[in-house]
């Protein structure tokens, strides 16, 4: 029986549309080679939506995202829109979608493919075989906390304010995601905060500890300060299995983990919400990189993170593990053939552009 799934694709800005095009070719292949059938709708977000509609995220796009089984997102932002008001910036496109869809759990995996061990700036023995998952809370914390803003003080100087806020409910629901995921992995969670200097961090640690004692005592739990975690990720990243952390630290630590693997262009992510009454878990899949304005329009972008985001969608939203793995293996196979986009290029490898990398993945799938 054919299962019809509604996908909203939002390619966004910069390299977003370039890498999305390659992922959509893979999606076509999946449709032709599985019992899945997709209704794919495309729309604008970020700077492209500002140019067309004056805002980075329209009500219409929010409604389409809510009606979809999954959203496949590219990236937003770029110098063209740097001067627009803070609440209208392209990045509001992604932050707003996360908020509107209640996508509180951001899953970012950092896996080192054997053939890319040499692409990292870190010594091979430190990263070979690395497979870690960062579970980042993504609708709370300092990016959303009130009060916020920039104000002029009576003496004419200015003050910028942001506020880190976490409730016990927010902490518990994200911790639950991390514990559940860890059970499917190496069963280890490291919870990361700054309880030495932040009350929100203290509450975080208490709530995670309580939940662990009550429901997840079979999972090995440790706690670490965020600054130490940054250091440990470079020193010995393989000590970690699942890292659980808030929005701000997760943002920074996951970029750090990305560079362990060699390139931002290699890493996919999923952002999930709570299961709805109709059984659908709201979900958005996107590469962790941004719009890379420095290489946009040059055919140099690595499309693998976007294609691997599609693979995550097949796995987590559509429960199609086998075909998802096939897509991942096709990406790995082109790397094993020595094909490299500039961001992961090394001696003796063959330099290719975005389109040729996408074509090579398709050729692997068709074998
Ligand atoms: P970035 O991720 O866009 O780029 C950082 C560096 O990595 C650049 O040198 C870029 O060329 C390289 N890079 C990124 N993706 C690549 C890929 N697929 N292939 C090859 N190289 C790649 O981060 P940035 O430069 O800090 O931000 C640029 C814009 O993107 C900003 O406007 C930022 O706000 C936005 N941004 C958006 C998202 C999102 O849409 N979710 C995430 C991060 C940054």
Image (cartoon, rainbow, N blue to C red):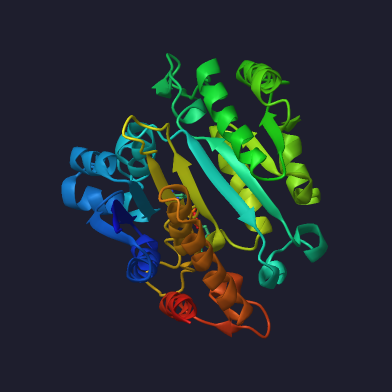
Q: Report if residue 244 is visible in the image.
A: yes
Q: Nearer the viewer, residue 214 or 23?
A: 214
- Which residue shows up at 56% across the image and 47% down it? 108
Q: Nearer the viewer, residue 82 or 184?
A: 184
Q: Which quadrant of the figure has residue 85? A: top left
- Which residue shows up at 74% across the image and 47% down it? 233
Q: Which quadrant of the figure has residue 80? A: bottom left
Query: x and y percent of residue 265 in the render?
Result: 53, 62
* Residue 296 against residue 204 in the figure, above or below: below
Answer left or right for 186 relative to 92: right
Answer left or right for 24 relative to 329: left
Query: x and y percent of residue 255 in the render?
Result: 59, 49
Query: x and y percent of residue 345 in the render?
Result: 61, 76
**Which of the image's four quarters has the N terminus?**
bottom left
* Residue 317 against residue 2 in the figure, above or below: above
Q: Nearer the viewer, residue 340 or 115?
A: 115
Q: Report if residue 56 is visible in the image.
A: no
Query: x and y percent of residue 254 in the render?
Result: 60, 46
- Farthest residue to the front: give it: 1
């Amino acid at each position: 029986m054919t299962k019809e799934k509604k996908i909203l694709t939002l390619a966004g800005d910069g390299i977003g549309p370039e890498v999305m095009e390659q992922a959509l070719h893979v999606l076509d292949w999946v449709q032709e080679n599985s019992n899945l059938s997709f209704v794919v709708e495309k729309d604008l977000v970020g700077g492209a939506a500002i140019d067309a509609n004056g805002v980075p995220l329209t009500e219409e796009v929010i409604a389409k995202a809510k009606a979809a089984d999954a959203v496949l997102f590219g990236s937003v932002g770029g110098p063209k829109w740097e001067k627009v008001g803070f609440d209208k910036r392209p990045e509001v496109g992604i932050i707003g979608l996360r908020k509107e869809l209640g996508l509180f759990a951001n899953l970012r995996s950092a896996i080192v493919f054997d053939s890319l061990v040499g692409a990292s700036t870190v010594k091979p023995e430190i990263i070979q075989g690395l497979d870690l998952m960062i579970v980042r809370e993504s609708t709370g914390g300092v990016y959303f906390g009130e009060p916020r803003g920039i104000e002029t003080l009576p003496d004419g100087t200015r003050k910028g304010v942001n506020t880190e806020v976490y409730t016990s409910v927010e902490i518990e629901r994200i911790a639950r995601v991390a514990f559940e995921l860890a059970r499917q992995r190496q069963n280890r969670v490291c919870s990361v905060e700054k309880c030495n200097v932040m009350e929100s961090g203290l509450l975080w640690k208490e709530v995670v500890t309580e939940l662990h004692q009550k429901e997840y005592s079979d999972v090995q739990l440790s706690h670490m300060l965020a600054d130490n975690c940054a250091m440990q990720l470079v020193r010995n990243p393989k000590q970690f299995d699942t890292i659980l952390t808030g929005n701000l630290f997760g943002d920074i630590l996951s970029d750090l983990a990305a560079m362990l693997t060699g390139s931002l262009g290699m890493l996919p992510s999923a952002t999930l919400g709570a299961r709805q009454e109709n059984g659908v878990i709201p979900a958005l899949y996107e590469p962790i990189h941004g719009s890379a304005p420095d290489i946009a329009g040059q055919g140099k972008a690595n499309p693998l993170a976007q294609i691997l985001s599609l693979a995550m969608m097949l796995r987590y939203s559509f429960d199609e593990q086998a075909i998802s793995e096939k897509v991942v293996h096709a990406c790995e196979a082109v790397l094993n053939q020595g094909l490299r986009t500039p961001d992961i290029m090394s001696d003796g490898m063959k330099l290719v552009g975005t389109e040729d990398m996408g074509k090579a993945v398709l050729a692997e799938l068709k074998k």
